[in-house]
Image (spheres, rainbow, N blue to C red):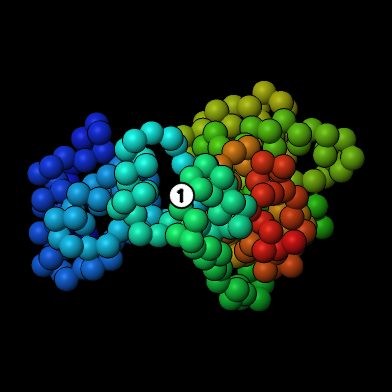
Amino acid sequence: VWSAPVGRLGWRFGSAVSLARFLRRERVTLVIGNVGRDLRLGAVAGWLAGAALLQRRGLMRGLRRGPLQRWLYGRVVRRVIVNSEALRRLILGSAPFLAGRVVLLPNAIDVARPLAGEAARLRTELGIESDARLVGAVGRLTPMKGFEHLLAAWPLVLERHRAARLVIFGDGELRSALEQQATGLGISASVSFAGFRDDVGALYDALDVFVLCSVRDESMSHAALEAMAHARPVVVSDAASGGLEAAL
């Protein structure tokens, strides 16, 4: 692990020099950046160390326009790695000069099944009856994931299935607000916030339906692919459906 301050612009010359030294010492010849500040820092450090720069993009966003972006992607970034065909088309639509340099590598998932009885254990732990209809979602509790809309729709489900339960796996900045929303809607008795867990495979097997309710930026969702690998029906929002062509 190498770390250094990046500054407001996304890089500092001293940090770039330090990273370049690290790259040379470890004989790194290929650097993969993710967010913009990674890319700016990697561009300078890679140039100093003679390492090639790639970017991995997983958010459904095109490239911003501007001279800096044109220089980075036109002269510095060797390849852009994306995880869905929809994202590849979006990137090329915003930056046609990248033709031939946008590479599709779909997300991979672990298809190993949980041990027998894990689904029943999870339902017992969460206080959910074995015959209750269980709907679940997995993700960071952030605005892009749209969990507030899932909670807003839940009373409509309860009108049809009064014993149904909803469980949300994950944690994040909106947890307190979402818990308050559930209380305000009068649905907290049927909603469980399970927090961050490492036994999410048991959740998929315990579910009757999985929901992906993202409202923006979702390319190819690991969670949706995992749910389908566990043979669970998946309900996907319009905003999140573009990157799931591999499953259609």
Which residue is found at the position 54% from the left and 68% from the top? 108
Q: Residue furthest front?
A: 97
Side of 130 relative to 79 (left or right)? right
Taking the image as drawn, is residue 186 in sight?
Answer: yes
Side of 220 relative to 58 (left or right)? right
Q: Residue furthest top?
A: 184
Percent across and percent down for residue 231 are 74, 67
Which residue is found at the position 66% from the left and 72% from the top? 117
Tell me how many marks there are: 1
Which residue is found at the position 58% from the left and 76% from the top? 112
Q: Which quadrant, please, contains the N terminus?
A: bottom left
Which residue is found at the position 15% from the left and 48% from the top? 16
The answer to which quarter of the image holds residue 106 is: bottom right
Percent across and percent down for residue 17 are 10, 50
Crowding at dot 1, Cα within 10 Å, few <14 / some 14-19 / many 20+, comes out as few
23 or 130: nearer the viewer: 23
Q: Which quadrant, please, contains the C terminus?
A: bottom right
40 or 170: nearer the viewer: 40
Residue occupied by mark 1: 97
Percent across and percent down for residue 157 are 82, 39
Side of 139 relative to 208 (left or right)? left
Vertical placement of 172 versus 55: above or below? above
Vertical placement of 159 versus 71: above or below? above
Taking the image as drawn, is residue 223 in sight?
Answer: no
Q: Residue furthest right?
A: 160
Give the residue type at disc 1. Phe
The answer to which quarter of the image holds residue 68 is: top left
Percent across and percent down for residue 87 are 57, 51
Q: Mark 1: which secondary structure?
A: helix
